[in-house]
Image: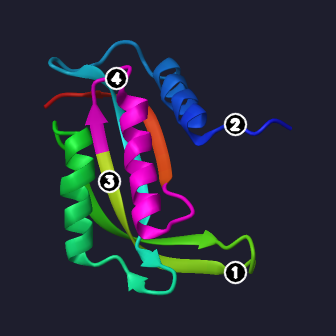
Amino acid sequence: MRRVGLAAVASLIVFNAAQAAPSICLLRGEHLMIEAQLFFGRDVEGRGAVTKQEWSDFAAGVIAKDFPEGFTVTDGEGAWLDPDSKTAIHEDSKIVLIVAKQSPGMTAKLMHVIEAYKTQFHQHSVGLVTRQVCAAF
């Protein structure tokens, strides 16, 4: 089976989200937009959790630069199955919600945020969910 790169998968996700959504928004002032939810685990193997200051620096230095129109961050509690130990791992997380106009560069921006976090905090993955929505700001 051929392996597909993460950027290609994200491009397909954003493309498919755009294809599956309604073409007409119901309320005046709404526009078709892409909603992306990103799930960032905060446990860093061998050193403890990403601190509040580290998260603030990451959000300001990476997320805000790629999505200057805005985003929302909430705290969460995540769980995932460790493929090696086959045990459930529970950790604090940050959930980032981004709603933006679909653009050719959106996939690259999402992938930049994901890869920057994985590199900086030694993470195996960052969760990503995308969908097309109607929104007004």
Look at 30% across and 18% down and name the residue there.
25
Residue 18: x and y in percent read: 46, 22
The amino acid type of the residue labelled 4 equals Gln
Nearer the observer, disc 2 or disc 4? 2
* Location of mark 1 (residue): 87
Q: Horizontally, is 128 left or right of 73 in the view?
A: right
Residue span colored magenta: 98-126
Residue 114: x and y in percent read: 43, 50
Q: Is residue 59 visible?
A: yes
Cα distance between the residues tagged 1 and 4: 38 Å
Which of the two discs, 2 and 4, labels the residue nearer the N terminus?
Answer: 2
Cα distance between the residues tagged 2 and 4: 23 Å
Q: Is residue 103 magenta?
A: yes
Cα distance between the residues tagged 4 and 3: 17 Å
Position of the C terminus by quadrant: top left
Residue 63: x and y in percent read: 26, 49
Which of the two discs, 3 and 1, labels the residue nearer the N terminus?
Answer: 1
Q: Is residue 71 visible?
A: no
116 up-or-down from 132: above or below = below
* Location of mark 3 (residue): 96
67 up-or-down from 123: above or below = above
In the image, farthest residue toward the right: 1
Cα distance between the residues tagged 3 and 1: 26 Å
* Location of mark 4 (residue): 102
Q: Horizontally, is 28 left or right of 106 in the view?
A: left
Res 28 quadrant in image: top left
Residue 92: x and y in percent read: 40, 76
Nearer the observer, disc 3 or disc 2? 2
Q: Is residue 104 magenta?
A: yes
